[in-house]
Image: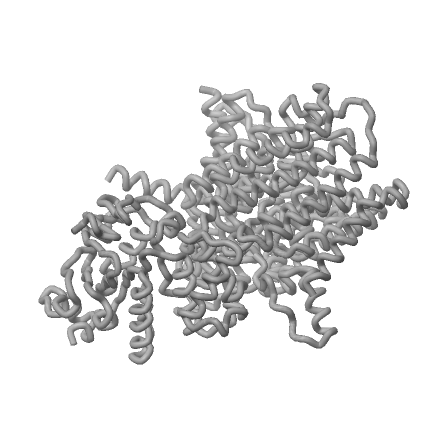
Amino acid sequence: MPSEALLSVRGVTKRFGGLTALYDVSFDVAPGEIFGVIGPNGAGKTTLFSCLVGAQTPTSGEIRFRGERLNGLSTNAAVRRGLVRTHQIVRPFRDMTVEENVSIGAHFGAGKRRGADARRRVADVLGRMGLSARAGALAGTLPIGDLKRLEIARALATEPACLCLDEVMGGLNPAEIGAAMTLVSEIRASGVTVLMIEHHIHAVAGVTDRVLVLNFGEKIAEGPPHDVLKDPAVVTAYIGDDEEAAS
Amino acid sequence: MRRLPLATGAALAIFTLAAPLFLERGTLNDVWNLAFAVILASAWNILGGFAGQVSLGYSVFLGIGAYTTVLLSLKGVNPFWTLPLGAVLAVLFSVLIGLPAFRLRGPYFTIATIGVGEAVRVTAASASFTGGSSGLRMPAGSFDFTINYEAMAVLAIVTVAVAAWVKRSAFGHALAAIRQDIDAAEALGVGSTRFKLAAHALSAALVALAGSLYAINFQYIAPGSVFDFRLSLSIVLMPIVGGVGTVAGPVLGAIVFSTLQIKLLAIPALRDSYLFIYGALLILVMLYEPRGLFGLARRLASRLRRRPAPPPEATRAL
Amino acid sequence: MQDIAGVLVNTVISAALYATMAYGLAVIYGVMRIINLAHAGLRMLGAYATLTLFTRFGLDPFLSLLVVGPLFFLFGVVLYRLVVHRLPRSGAAPSMESLLLLFGVWLVLQNLAYVIWTGDTQSILTSYTMKSVPILGVRVGVPSLFVFAGSVVSLVFLNVLLKATYLGKAIRAVTQNRDAALLSGVDASRISSLAFGLGTAFAGVAGGMMSSLYAFTPDFGRSFLLKAFCIIVLGGMESVTGVAAGALVLAFLENALGAWTTLPTSLQDAASFALLFVTLVAFPQGLPGLAARVRQAFR
């Protein structure tokens, strides 16, 4: 049902000089879905991500979001159309307060809110992310856990139709991963489609509806996480790289 | 606490506007120079301080304003009618330069602006319409210093007010986000090029207006005076020494700068070397207080009140 | 034909001087990711140091380079220890703070020079200043030839230093991959101060040589600073052969404009500033980046 897809990727290839980072990757993300993209190191996850959110233009192929062609559109233009990303290594505006950080998203994202309207949206997002008590603190003074939530809060404040999370599970312990999964489910429940990029398959298996597995820039499997886990190609790809994946 | 700066600003504004009633011409001239410096510093700060894009080519906009006024006045146009045109031309030039140059980041942008400034200066010096190195004189006619003074005073007040408004607006927040992390700003929907162009255009227009009034006041301009690299230097040094990225910092920097300038230029031995002190100040500011004199004043004030320092607005100023 | 020979001879001669001047910037940029705006002031100071040695001690301006070089090396090390060292270290990209700090140093040097030597235009007149010899049928000034020789000696010296000494290897290692070099036990602070000294020495020597070619004031060196930037940007910021190529391109452009167009001399300078701007914007990786792209296109 490609016509109903929120995000549609068709035959995307990306070359850097002689190196092919992505080769002929296609997939669809339906509205309201939690979709995972996984793969071992160097599989092309980051390149795919960059192509989606506008930092890079695919060499060939097409990316459509809500039916509109995204190829070559700048990052900020993609955000205003409802496709937003977070950074794996958090990038807060350190000299701004938490509230001001989030208000940037509210002002300049898809919602384009100003004044009291923006303040309501910011307060709402801060509440949902458990950051209300920190609203007036300078972002530079926050501990890393709060910074990770701030990173997501800012992205949510842009009022995305699709939120792309870049390895949010990386470096978390099992208890924190559980909390993060709950958070992702809540975000979906609020009407936002989620695309997660992760290194570890087990980090997304419990929360995603479908996953896509990349290896050496090519799609090797796609489907519900528990089916994909049993796929021999996936098991082979992860052997020696990540024994946990097969467990 | 929030009313205090507003009240101080209003008092300064009223004093400046009413000054011709009680100050003699010589002192008034000093205040004119001060207002001129405040405009240049505060306008530059919109791009250089708020958005962190340090340009060393701002004398170009001053020159555009000044030359538009003189050239049109020589054609018989009332000098004050030429002001808007100078501002528009400066805006156009700022976009022309900005579109390519804003693809560059940090110091590379700065170096490109030195290149643009020098190229314009050198070209202007050898072009015939600028009067070459001998310059151009305004047509002889009625020149009223008081009118020019009031115009400069109003422009200074408007510039500071615009800077204060920008700082608080969503536009100002976008500029602050661009200064701190341009990629993160883009990832939240901030169209950084558009906002940088807008900040560049706004400050260019204000500087061009000041340039027009400068030409009317001195009745004579030459490429060596309005496109001077030292002028571009002063425009940058005032806000940085005063406190980059704040509204009051550039004003403070302009006051310190103009006062020192008058004192230093009065000493014949220092006629050529007065910039020494600014170089030294710049080194000290960069090493010890990136928020400039204004940051230092705030730190001292909060220490006197024995309270924790107020949240810094820009710990990494640039 | 005469024209072409003239342009080529003059291109090679000015390129050698330009390269010497630009290496001072490139070494410091490579090791510390600092854009040394004080370079123009250091070059101006080199010219005045040569002048002082000439008028006070009657030392030939080219022999005095043997004094100026080591003297400026020490001055650079002191400047680094005293001022530059206190800055927070630049990351992968050069920081605005370092640029502005060295800008302040430039202003201080320039205005100290106004106090010491006044703003009067100075020049050095030796017995050979006005003499010239024919090369490939082109008359070349003797000072220009000495400058060429001095530049070649400096560049050979630099090359030997970079290739054959521990310091040189460390400088190249830090330039290419700072983190890896630090992990291999290179003392970054020591290498930085030595590299700053080296860059300063090259600035001083370039300035000393230029004092035989140009009249100068304390304001001397700004347009040459932009030319040096243009060269290292063209050269890809940190590559040794890149800088040489950048110097040749700029020198050829200037000499060609001078010989084959009727542009006034002042506008030839504007051409090099415009080249700087275009290069920065159009190929930020400089000639090496451009070459890589061309190779890729024809693959």
Number of labels in the image equals: 0
Q: Is residue A221 above or below residue B263?
A: below
Residue A128 is situated, as x and y percent measured from the top left of the image, at 40, 69
Residue found 60% across the figure and 68% down from its top: B311
Q: Is residue A72 left or right of residue C97?
A: left
Nearest to the observer: residue C127 or residue C21: C21
Q: In terms of image quadrants, where is residue C245?
A: top left
Q: Residue at x 55, y 62 (%)?
A: C193
Residue B18 picture quarter: top right
- Residue B197 at x, y = what percent? 52, 42
In the image, B150 versus B302, the foreground residue is B150
Most foreground residue, C84 or C196: C84
Whether residue C97 is visible here, answered yes or no, is yes
The image quadrant where one finds the C terminus of chain B is bottom right
Residue appearing at x 23%, y 56% in the figure: A29
Given the current orientation, which residue lies at the most extreme bottom position? A175
Horizontal placement of C87 versus A143: left or right? right
- Above/below status of C33 relative to C230: below
Q: Residue C287: name its quadrant.
A: top left
Q: Identify the colour scheme used.
A: one colour
**Residue in the image at 68% along x and 49% along y:** B160
Vertical arrangement, residue A243 with respect to residue B227, above or below: below
Specify the farthest residue to the left.
A232
Q: Quadrant of the N terminus of chain B?
A: bottom right
Nearer the observer, A157 or C256:
A157
Q: Position of residue C112 (x, y in %)?
A: 73, 51
In the picture shown, does residue B153 fall above or below C196? above
Q: Is residue C211 visible?
A: no
**Residue C30 at x, y percent in the picture:** 47, 55
